[in-house]
Image: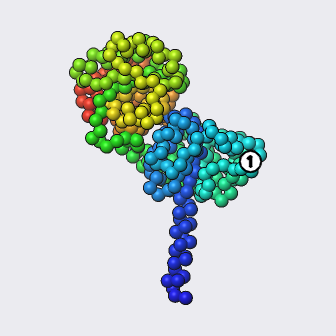
């Protein structure tokens, strides 16, 4: 037997081992914004790893470009992950070398089930969010958890890249001709009042002649009760409403949005990642953890006087309208 006859099977064993160590299952059920925090690290890993994600819609609808498969955990058989005793049928996602799960597991039930369902994999469990003392962006925290699971990543670089190049953005030549506001979120504590948004829409209407844009109010399920109110308002001001668009339609809209204004919400994160100039209005959440990631993001935090805050927002908008291709400052 020649040295080459020995080398070829050894190379095959090494190659298969390397490939096996590149297969990762990530379990992260959560709302839209929570799920989007996976995107920066998924982009960094997508060329070298076979990644499967189990999560929830609509968040997983936006991961497809960077993952091999997505599973919706709101559909069977993912309930088996939470059973007191592992089910004989198991869970999808095999084979994987790493199973990385972002769920609380105080009694060890999930850990036990994962080890049973994925016996060939090393399993790692982490809380969904960083601790309050860490003051760390959620996307960086996700990356650091993957590093602890021995996945090769540079969290600082991953986060930096997400602020330089839109994770979900089109080519720089994409034509952006929409101005979009999203006056809601899934948490009422984050939201500014309806009168605030009415006044803001009135002020925005003054710019329409100087910068002819398609003015759109984006409303989701959380704003369903507000739809009649905005329907009457937009008819009088020349705006249009986009109500619960499909995931594809929503991403298409945001990729063609020049300027987006919204609360700290999953939609605002999506707008920033799609490359829209984004004004994010924070109120009850920590921007250190939830700053939208994109190259054209401006964070605004509340003034004691809502009128003064509205004036601050208008000044930012005037800057965008005057120089629509200039990158806004980031705080």
**Relative image position of residue 33 (x, y in whole percent):** 50, 35
Q: Residue furthest bottom?
A: 1
Name the one closer to the observer, 199 or 119: 119
Residue at which label 1 appears:
87
Question: Does 133 sit above or below residue 205?
Answer: below
At x 29% / y 29%, what residue is drawn? 177
**Relative image position of residue 76 (x, y in whole percent):** 65, 41
At x 31% / y 24%, what residue is drawn? 214
Taking the image as shown, residue 86 lies to the left or right of residue 18, namely right
Taking the image as shown, residue 257 lies to the left or right of residue 119, namely left
Name the one closer to the observer, 301 or 57: 57
**Relative image position of residue 159 (x, y in whole percent):** 43, 44
Q: Is residue 209 visible?
A: yes
Circle 1 Cα neighbour tier, 10 Å, few/some/many (<14 / 14–19 / ≥20) = some
At x 53% / y 21%, what residue is drawn? 188
Q: Is residue 147 visible?
A: no
At x 51% / y 47%, what residue is drawn? 143
| Quadrant of the frame with the C terminus | top left
| Quadrant of the frame with the N terminus | bottom right
Taking the image as shown, residue 7 lies to the left or right of residue 198, namely right
């Amino acid at each position: 037997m020649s040295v080459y006859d020995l080398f070829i099977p050894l190379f095959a064993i090494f190659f298969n081992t390397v490939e096996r160590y590149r297969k990762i299952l990530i379990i992260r059920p959560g709302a839209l914004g929570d799920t989007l925090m996976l995107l920066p690290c998924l982009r960094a890993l997508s060329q070298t790893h076979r990644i499967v994600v189990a999560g929830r819609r609509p968040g997983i609808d936006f991961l497809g470009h960077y993952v091999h498969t997505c599973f919706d955990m709101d559909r069977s058989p993912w309930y088996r992950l939470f059973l007191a005793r592992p089910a004989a049928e198991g869970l999808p996602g095999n084979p994987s070398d790493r199973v990385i799960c972002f769920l609380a597991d105080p009694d060890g039930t999930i850990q036990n089930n994962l080890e049973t369902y994925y016996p060939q994999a090393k399993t790692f469990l982490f809380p969904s969010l960083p601790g309050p003392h860490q003051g760390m962006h959620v996307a960086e925290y996700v990356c650091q958890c993957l590093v602890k699971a021995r996945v090769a990543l540079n969290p600082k670089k991953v986060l930096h890249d997400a602020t330089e190049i839109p994770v979900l953005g089109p080519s720089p030549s994409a034509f952006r001709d929409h101005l979009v506001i999203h006056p809601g979120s899934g948490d009422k504590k984050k939201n500014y009042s309806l009168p605030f948004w009415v006044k803001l829409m009135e002020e925005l209407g003054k710019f329409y002649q100087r910068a002819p844009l398609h003015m759109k109010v984006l409303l989701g399920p959380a704003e369903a009760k507000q739809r009649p109110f905005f329907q009457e308002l937009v008819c009088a001001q020349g705006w249009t409403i986009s109500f619960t668009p499909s995931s594809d339609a929503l991403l298409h809209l945001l990729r063609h949005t020049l300027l987006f204004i919204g609360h700290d919400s999953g939609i605002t994160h999506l707008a920033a990642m799609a490359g829209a100039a984004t004004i994010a209005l924070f109120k009850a959440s920590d921007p250190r953890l939830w700053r939208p990631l994109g190259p054209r993001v401006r964070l605004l935090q509340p003034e004691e006087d809502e009128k003064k805050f509205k004036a601050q927002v208008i000044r930012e908008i005037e800057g965008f309208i005057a120089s629509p291709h200039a990158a806004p400052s980031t705080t």
